[in-house]
Image (cartoon, rainbow, N blue to C red):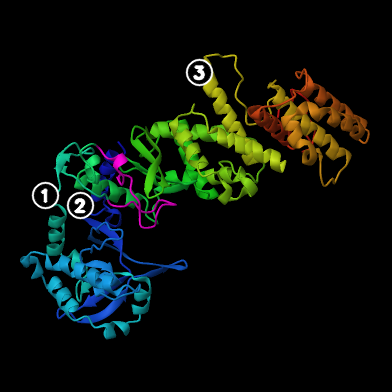
Amino acid sequence: MIFQALNDYYLRKCDDPDPAQRLPPFGLEQKEIPFLLEINAAGELLQLRDTRELQGKKKVARSFRVPIGVKRASNIAANFLWDTVEYVLGVDTKGKPERVVEQHAAFRARISALPEVVREDAGIQAVTRFLDRIDLAQLQLQPAWADALESNAVLSFMLHGDLELVCQRPAVVNAALNVSTGDDAPQAMCLVTGAQASVERLHTSIKGVWGAQTSGANIVSFNARAFESYGKTERQGENAPVSRAAAFAYTTALNHLLRKDSTQRIQVGDASTVFWAEKQDAFEDIFGDIFNDNPDDGTSAVQTLLNAVHSGTWGASDENTRFYILGLAPNVARISIRFYHCVTLGELGQRIAQHFKDLSLVRSSRDPQYPSLFRLLAAVAVQSKADNIPPNLGGAIVDAIFAGVNTPYPSMWLNAAVGRCRAERNVNYLRAAAIKACLNRQMRQARLSLSKSSLEQEFLPMLDFSNLNPAYRLGRLFAVLEKIQEEASPGLNATIRDRYYGAASSTPVAVFTTLLRLKNAHVKKLTPGRVTGFEKLLGDVLGPVNDFPKHLPLADQGRFALGYYHQRQDFFTKKPDDTTNTTTPTEGTPA
């Protein structure tokens, strides 16, 4: 299913109206070529052209369409009319002269193996003459030679007066395609297209997956007998027969989606996530902005999506268009599929909208309305550092978002959010939003599985006076006691939260008797009017609580944190008839 969708995407991009986005036909690939050997018809070097351009602080080479490269690890195998300095020029850069001689011979052998009619091409003849008398002294005079030699850079040839490389000349391209589609491979039914075709033994490497090898890794590969089918030992690709054309299509499409400047990829934890539609659609361009960390782009993209969901109109988009999301993660020398979803745009919009609805929470003007996934992950990491984010957490959250509105978020997320609240004694907006989202989805799933309407209702974005859950009420109580202390002793550097939050949220019975006793000392410093208001609020909050629990499990610690956050925010929310923004509401007062 994944390869079929990628194959369809490849076929669509082959006909892309934008030449810059058009994918190469079977047998060719896009390759960054930093340096070009510009030669004349006599094979004389005119210049070593540097194609690199400065982008930020780094030089980036220009990309050219060239015959697809060979797959090699430690073996010697040359590419067709483009390769490294060692292969093309036979110049040793790593202290292995004997090996370089073999590499250069392999490069020349690829050219010598061309049909005679192709060897008569003016470009091929010029390259042959150049290779027959390589002038290293002239190369050393070129300004770009030092850089090319130091990095063993990739080179190719250009005939003076041409606008294309020698390997792009029509006769040369045809020869390359004929060689790459030979019939020496076994025939089998392709698992992607269903047609009888030559099976690709080694699939092209996938590059751009974060954490994988820089040279690329494979989704389909067999390197041990345990992975091979009976009778197909040491025959690799035959164990999962994919035709050469289909293997080229899916790898080219995936490398295109994973390229450096791609707008159709996002990094979610350790999962490099790519996405595409079954046909050209504007949503491909805004999907990445919904989950990125740019506040302006993210807010605009989410607002556009929510407007489409609420209005039921998708503009130029068709809500029945299928949309694909694929998460890839490194696994030693391979790439593993972390998650894969195929949904219509209509379903996708509803699921993303539900995600932000689950996160919706009363907040200050400084907090983002639609928090990015990275901020949510960093908020539950130790010291809020990206390096400390659990590697699988981001992918698991995204998987839950796209799996359906009733799919629970990973329990690891709730555990991490509650744990950071206790460790740092700080229930901030992002952690409270994560807790609310996790708890609401747990309750939604419980209602579906038990088919009971009397189960606990989902948490609201703001303070819920009707919520009778003891843990939620105790969180509110803790916030009220802290507020009393703050008003009794203005300018305190530390409050009861800094000393008692962890114990109060996990073992209430051991703490709240002490806190209520301290409260009696604090209220003596307040005016009679404030004392009356707080005592009434305390009575309303504690009314449904029969006893202080000995221990609160993880989910109830989350409810405690949410009750604390809601009550604190309510204290600083201006009411319609308030003259200040720090009044103390009583139970039942609208927030």
Using residue 142 as the reference point, say whether residue 514 is left or right of it.
right
- Mark 2 vs mark 1, foreground winner is 1
The residue that mark 1 highlights is 183
Q: Nearer the viewer, residue 15 or 261?
A: 261
Tell me the amino acid under the disc marked 1. Answer: Asp
Q: CA distance from mark 2 to mark 3?
A: 50 Å
Tell me the amino acid under the disc marked 2. Answer: Phe
As drawn, the label of residue 344 is: none
Q: Is residue 360 visible?
A: no
Where is residue 167 drawn, in percent x and y? 19, 65
Tell me the amino acid under the disc marked 3. Answer: Ser
Neighbour tally class for label 1: few under 14, some 14-19, many 20 plus, Cα within 10 Å: few
Image point (54%, 18%), residue name? 447
Compare marks 1 and 3 and give the one earlier in the sequence. Answer: 1
The residue that mark 2 highlights is 26
Say above or below: 542 vs 107: above
Mark 3, secondary structure of its residue:
helix
Q: Nearer the viewer, residue 551 or 315?
A: 551
Q: CA distance from mark 1 to mark 3?
A: 56 Å
225 within the magenta span: yes
Using residue 41 as the reference point, say whether residue 116 is left or right of it.
left
Looking at the rendering, the stretch of residues picked out in magenta corresponds to: 204-229
Q: CA distance from mark 2 to mark 1?
A: 15 Å
Where is residue 110 drawn, in percent x and y? 16, 65
Name which quarter of the figure residue 459 lies in: top right
Name which quarter of the figure residue 186 lies in: top left
The residue sitting at the left extreme is 117
Q: Main secondary structure of the magenta part?
A: loop
Using residue 522 as the reference point, say whether residue 115 is left or right of it.
left
Q: Is residue 508 visible?
A: yes
Where is residue 483 drawn, in percent x and y? 81, 36
The residue that mark 3 highlights is 449
